[in-house]
Amino acid sequence: METMTNQLSDRINNLATSATLAMAAKARELRGEGKDVIGLSLGEPDFNTPDFIKQAAIDAVNENYNSYTPVDGYAELKQAIITKFKRDNDLTYEPSQIVVSTGAKQALYNLAQVCLNPGDEVVLPCPYWVSYSDIVKLAEGVPVEVPTSIDTDFKMTPGQLRAAITPKTKMLWYSSPCNPSGSIYSKEELRALADVLKDYPEIIVVSDEIYEHINYVGDHASMAQFEDMYDRTVTVNGVAKAFAMTGWRIGYIGGPSYIARACNKIQGQVTSGANCIAQRATITALMSPVSKIQYMVDEFKERRKLILDLVQEIPGFECNEPEGAFYIFPNISYYFGKTLKGKEISNASDFAMFLLEEANVATVTGDAFGGPNCIRISYAASQEQIKEAMKRIKAAVAG
Ligand code: PMP
Ligand code: GLU
């Protein structure tokens, strides 16, 4: 029997567990107990990695790519990333401005560690991706949440940005397309935010574009495309979502070379370079025409229509029409203060737990994303699963 008391650091004791991963683990556990749980909690494409990418990995194994990799990534991969940035985003980077990491998550962690001093503030438009807030806190930064609502399609307005900035503001982090709201900032909207930032030239912007290709409305705009923002914007991307490569763990940044050097330095002490085989496969993924992955985007688009139609039939779910990513983020505050099947619903966490227990559907509470009136439902699942899940939710809330 273990008898030692908790000797862990305050740092870890104060860290929240990732709500997305925790809910996915809970769903897995219940499934292990024989419960028929539909998992709509994790943001993970349900497709297999395309064969042409798998083949590149098999070739890399056979060609003996087995040694430590350069800390900031293979030169050929950095070149492929440079080509991708130019081709898709009209962004010009040098190899010294690129760092490959173990997932976009590590790229974000690096950025917080290398840019933030204790007490530095990071503006996070809500809802934000679940890990931003805790990654910032791990670097002793202070997340400054900017609440938004369905009325502005969950986007931060220039006025809100200005009001959130203080002398301690060091960074702004956002994702577009956004996880969890699916909202996409247009070029004009980004320009309006950049205009506010003109008055604060010291603020660094982290533009997380990992859902870039999962876009149902058209053009993708990047903050770094504006000449006056290029020098202080870090563009984060990765292969997890568009190429169905979540487990391969490759993400990357393009940004100012002094920041890239710093990310290289921290990575050199913490993980070394990212996995050799996954990096080789990523070269093939990024160098292929984007049309090769369009079939997945087309399928996500159909599922989006399906889930939006079905959610309308459920009382008390108020939803925007997401333009990208593969989530809906309905406001379910209608149920707060109500009792469903004998369970009191006080907040979104109660509601997500209710759905898990009474409908056998795993979702994630909006609290974890800075959206306490909402839950996140991933539609990276088959149309049958989506139909069944929505049917179950409708039945459960009907009492
Ligand atoms: N940013 C956003 C907005 C995400 O949804 C995710 C989830 N995968 C990540 C970063 C992390 O990506 P990766 O799997 O490459 O670490
Ligand atoms: N990014 C995905 C999500 O939001 C994967 C889980 C995670 O990395 O937290 O569900």
Image (spheres, grey):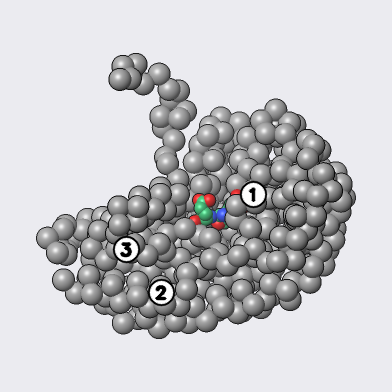
- 3D distance between C-alphas at marks 2 and 1: 27 Å
Horizontal and vertical percent for residue 133?
49, 44
Q: Which residue is mark 1?
A: 249
**Which quadrant holds residue 258?**
top right
SS of the residue under disc 2 = helix
Horizontal and vertical percent for residue 107?
66, 45
Q: Residue at x 75, y 61 (%)?
A: 55
SS of the residue under disc 1 = loop
Left or right for 188, reference 82? left
Viewport quadrant of the C terminus:
bottom left
211 vs 249, nearest the viewer: 249
Which is more foreground, mark 3 or mark 1?
3
149 vs 275, nearest the viewer: 275
Q: Which residue is mark 2?
A: 386
Quick one: label 3 or label 1, which is nearer the N terminus?
Answer: 3
Identify the residue at the far left of this view. 342
Q: Residue at x 34, y 16 (%)?
A: 4
- 3D distance between C-alphas at marks 3 and 1: 29 Å
Q: Identify the amino acid type marked 1.
A: Arg
Q: Is residue 157 visible?
A: no
Q: Using the image, tell me which numbered label, if any, was put on residue 236.
A: none
Q: Is mark 2 within 8 Å of ligand 2?
A: no
SS of the residue under disc 3 = loop
Horizontal and vertical percent for residue 297?
61, 75
Q: Identify the amino acid type marked 3.
A: Asp
- 3D distance between C-alphas at marks 3 and 2: 14 Å
Q: Which residue is mark 3?
A: 36
Q: Is mark 1 within 8 Å of ligand 1?
A: yes
Q: Identify the amino acid type marked 2.
A: Ile
Left or right for 238, reference 330? right
Q: Residues within 10 Å of mark 2 (few under 14, many from 20)?
A: many
Quick one: label 3 or label 2, which is nearer the N terminus?
Answer: 3
